[in-house]
Amino acid sequence: MSTPGIKILEPGLLSTLQDNGRFGQTQLGLSNGGVADKHSYYWLNRLLGNSNNAPCIEITGGGFSFVANSSLIFALTGAEMPLSINGHMVERWRSHSLKAGDRVDIDFAQGGVRSYLGFQGGFAQAKQFGSVSTVLREGIGGIDGCRLSRGLQLSVAEFKAGSNWRHLRLAEQHRPRFSNSATLRLIPTYQQQWFSRLQQRRFFSIRYRVSSQADRMGYRLSGAAIQCQPPKPLLSEGIALGAVQIPPDGQPIILLQDRQTIGGYPKIGAVLSLDIDVLMQTQQGAEIRFVPISMEQAHNQLHLNKARREAITLEYC
Amino acid sequence: MTTAQFHVQLASEDALIVYAEADSIATSNGLIRALDGLITAELGQVVIETTPSYGSILVRFDPYKTDHFHLRQKLKHLTSVCVCQEQTAEQLVTLPVYYSVESGPDLQRIAEFAGLSIEEVIEIHQAQVYQVFAIGFAPGFAYLGEVDPRLALPRLSTPRAQVPKGAVAIAERQTAIYPAPSPGGWNIVGLCPVDLFSPDSNCPMPYKVGDNVRFEAINKQEFIDLGGQL
């Protein structure tokens, strides 16, 4: 019997190994990395009974195929990528069984951008600096710091599902719906006072578009320019997830999972992480608006979201 | 006793940023390092990671264990007992550099900017002991300061698409070595043959924030013997 795992037949447009990310390595200049849509990843792990940091594959755009080397249990969440096992369409957002030799095809996205493929037990991949998350720009994590390629064999950690394992599904009303627009809640932070009242009001009224420069490092938006009046030069400083920097050309850049650790452009605030999950499922041309919320509201939203999710019971199928 | 002021600001839903303002970058950077040590020692239960830089430190907390009010209070307390660590740099790292027109395509421009000869530019750059003020931009990329004002040439108006691994470069009063090939807009004065980021080593980087660094000129043969590539 071969080691539990899969062989990649088609890696698709861009697929990488990810988990929640790499923390506490900023003294080396290492980015956090980690799954772009944490909400879809949370459900993936719940559906499989995995730990909340189990290594998975983030599939961007779609077009991913693999063959199982052994009996496995897997699930697919995130973007709307039609899923089939041995040519038969099956449901996403639920767990499925595979036996050795079964082929799985994940088609191109019809809504959303990134999907999450996971196996019960998670991939058995060595961590680098505390995480398996791949940061391509740094060549760190995953398989030699690279995107997944055709022919690659990935091992899945042994698991004890037992004969009483019953497949789970997330009811449709709880699944996210993807559209190519997003309203992002933003906490005014950092150098927001360097922007006049007028510029701040403009920022919250402009309809931006996601530009062609949108990846895991940052989403550059295009729209009317925002002016900043720096009272002094800004020394490079730590950049939080979701920080929105305004470079001299006035076009905002939302800094994301693979962002550089420090930078010197003024920042007008930071996007709520729950909305980053939504943003990361949009692509070039998506319409983006910002609405202000307070730090206290943000804190409440995080706790509410956690409580809501934990209260949802998965269905047996 | 140096006069310093700290202030704490919001950064994101799970991060605060503390700024230290003092009469020099070296002093504020020393305060930030001291504060980083205190945060690690005292607040490890609720702090996920810190990102120290020149005169600031980003403090990321676990929003399910604490909130910004509590953390702000604790940070204010720590800043009140924080003493500058300016004098306690832990090590002096000496890095060899092959300075030449061949390995440093911007040496000539810096010499013209400064009204000096190339030899004088090299002499001034390696005469100084620099401090590591921050690490970031890329793994192992250390921001060193402060460069002699005579050599403080601004960044290139159009960055190079590819700066070679080991490039020693200047931007304003900062100097740095590119640990890996990358795009970059700093002015290149030479090449360093030493690996500055080895992810598989127990000690991936030869320096950390707060350390002192000096450069030592080597010739082409020494550069090649040390594993350097042109």
Image (cartoon, coloured by chain):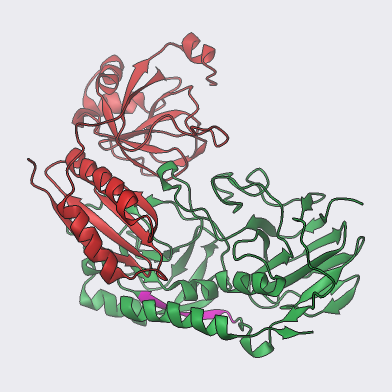
Chain colours: A green, B red
Q: Please give the count of numbered marks on the rendered protein.
A: 0
The answer to whether one can see residue A108 in this image is no
Q: Main secondary structure of the magenta part?
A: strand
Answer with the quarter of the image where residue B48 lies. Answer: bottom left
Q: Residue at x 44, y 24 (%)?
A: B191
Q: Can residue B94 be seen at all in this image of the molecule?
A: yes
Toward the viewer: B64 or A271? B64
Rendered position, A17 above or below A178: above
Residue nearer the viewer, B32 or B53: B32
B26 with respect to A81 (left or right): left
Which is more toward the observer, B19 or B38? B38
Task: Point out residue A34 in the picture as x, y percentages from the top left corner.
Answer: 56, 59
Q: Is residue A184 magenta?
A: yes
Would residue B177 be counted in the magenta stretch?
Answer: no
The magenta-colored residue range is A179-186
Look at 80% across and 58% down and name the residue there. A10
- Tell me where residue B150 appears, x and y as whole percent: 20, 28
Q: Is residue A274 left or right of residue A11?
A: left
Q: Residue placed at 69% from the left, 70% from the top?
A: A49
Q: Nearer the viewer, residue A147 or A28?
A: A28
User: Percent from the top left, x then y, of residue B62?
Assistant: 41, 65
> Given the current orientation, which residue lies at the most extreme bottom position?
A173
Q: Quadrant of the N terminus of chain B?
A: top left
